[in-house]
Image: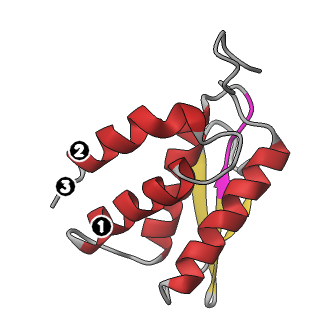
Amino acid sequence: MRNATNHPVSMDTLEFALVAKLLVVEARRRGLVVPGFRCPPRIVGVDRSLRRVGDHVTVAVRVKGRPVVAVVADMIEGVVVANRLIPPAADRLRRELWHSVSTSRLDVAAPLGNATAASGQEHAA
């Protein structure tokens, strides 16, 4: 679904997969735990869940009926939690991942400009 400026207001599974791939690349590049991503969560009624099995972490996010910015925020937070980061490292990673997504050529990046600015202000260390 798109708004009046032709930007996506909700995310489909292909866009989810593309954002997941970008976050995986960014986590790997930083030497972090690289979570797997899936949708939807197996737990009914939650927007995001995280499952650890041995060394593997899976972040599950509900996509259907949610704004793009909410889905991306949950995916980014999943990377932070998967790596058990605390401030200031957690704040820095959130800021860097928001920047990576918002400056990517992905179709979902355009409406994220304001979220990136807000994220930097809210989570600044």
**Vertical placement of 102 versus 17: above or below?**
above
Identify which residue, 83 or 69, lies in the foreground. Answer: 69
What percent of the width, then of the height, locates residue 58? 66, 69
What percent of the width, then of the height, locates residue 63? 71, 39
Question: Magenta region, mostly helix, strand or loop?
Answer: loop
In the image, the segment drawn in magenta is 60-64
Q: Which mark is residue 92?
A: 1
Q: Secondary structure at mark 2?
A: helix
Identify which residue, 84 or 42, lies in the foreground. Answer: 84
Asked whether the residues under the numbered discs 3 and 2 touch, taking CB atoms below 8 Å apart as contact, a structural biologist would say yes
State the separation of the CA atoms marked 3 and 2: 6 Å
Report crowding for label 3: few under 14, some 14 to 19, many 20 or more residues within 10 A (C-alpha).
Answer: some
Report crowding for label 1: few under 14, some 14 to 19, many 20 or more residues within 10 A (C-alpha).
Answer: some
Q: Amino acid at mark 1?
A: Arg
Q: Amino acid at mark 3?
A: Ala
Q: Secondary structure at mark 3?
A: loop
Q: Is residue 9 magenta?
A: no
Tag 2 residue: 122
Tag 3 residue: 124
Quadrant including the C terminus: bottom left
What percent of the width, then of the height, locates residue 55? 61, 90
Sequence-first tag of 1 and 2? 1
Asked whether the residues under the numbered discs 1 and 2 touch, taking CB atoms below 8 Å apart as contact, a structural biologist would say no
